[in-house]
Image (cartoon, rainbow, N blue to C red):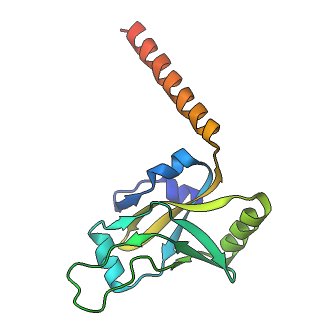
């Protein structure tokens, strides 16, 4: 049920950041949506689009999920009470979903990575991907297949003119 929500792109959704390298480095098996526990200055900074998901991942501790190495820049208009840009942020999901994810991560050796961060109905959400890492030769093969597919489609389009 959570996958369908994450795949839709409703009009009330404002994209903040996307982890494009994740699709290149990982094979995404499953997608889901989670909320974030944030401070006020983090939300204001995210509204300015100052979020970076590069090299971030999700870790588990005590039956909870935490977003690690996600950089949310300090809020520019804050005076003294700003947040730490690299602090770990707790993810909000149902307990059954968390248990299922922890089981898949430990059992199959999969990784949970953030794919994108966006606002939905005024709340900051993160789309998580249950992913399997790709080796270097796998990445090259994927790029090669994509280029071949693009060439075939271009030739078919040219022939149909």
* Outermost residue to the bottom: 80
**Is residue 51 shown to the viewer in this render?**
yes
Residue, x 30% and y 92% (percent of image)?
Answer: 81
Residue at 61% over, 62% down? 112
Q: Position of residue 94 (x, y in %)?
A: 62, 76
Judging depth in this view, the residue of 149 and 4 nearest the camera is: 149
Q: Point out the image quarter for the N terminus.
A: bottom right
Figure quadrant of residue 79: bottom left
Residue at x-position 35% and y-position 73%? 122
- Quick one: quadrant of the C terminus? top left
Name the residue nearer the viewer: 45 or 15.
45
Q: Is residue 145 left or right of residue 75?
A: right
Number of numbered labels in the structure image: 0
Pinpoint residue 64: horizontal percent, then vertical percent: 64, 80
Q: Nearer the viewer, residue 91 or 161?
A: 91
Is 39 placed above or below 31 here?
below
Residue 1 visible from this viewpoint: no
| 97 to 22, vertically: above or below | below
Task: Locate residue 142 relative to residue 126 in the image: left or right.
Answer: right
Q: Quadrant of residue 86?
A: bottom left
Q: Position of residue 144 (x, y in %)?
A: 55, 27
Left or right, residue 78 beside residue 40:
left
Vertical position of residue 55 compared to residue 74: above or below: above
- Is 156 drawn above or below residue 5 in the view shown? above
Please provide percent x and percent y for residue 73.
33, 73
Furthest residue toward right: 107
């Amino acid at each position: 049920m959570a996958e369908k929500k994450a795949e839709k792109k409703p009009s009330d959704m404002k994209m903040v950041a996307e982890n494009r390298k994740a699709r290149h480095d990982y094979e995404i098996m499953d997608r889901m949506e989670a909320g974030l526990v944030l401070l006020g200055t983090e939300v204001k900074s995210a509204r300015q689009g100052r979020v970076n998901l590069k090299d971030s991942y999700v870790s588990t501790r005590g039956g909870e999920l935490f977003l690690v190495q996600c950089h949310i820049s300090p809020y520019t208009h804050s005076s003294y009470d700003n947040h730490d840009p690299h602090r770990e942020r707790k993810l909000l999901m149902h307990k059954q979903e968390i248990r299922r994810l922890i089981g898949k991560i430990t059992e199959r050796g999969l990784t949970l990575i953030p794919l994108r961060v966006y606002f939905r109905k005024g709340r900051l959400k993160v789309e998580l991907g249950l992913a399997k890492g790709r080796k270097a030769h796998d990445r090259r093969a994927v790029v090669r297949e994509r280029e071949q597919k693009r060439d075939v489609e271009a030739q078919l389009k040219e022939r149909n003119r």
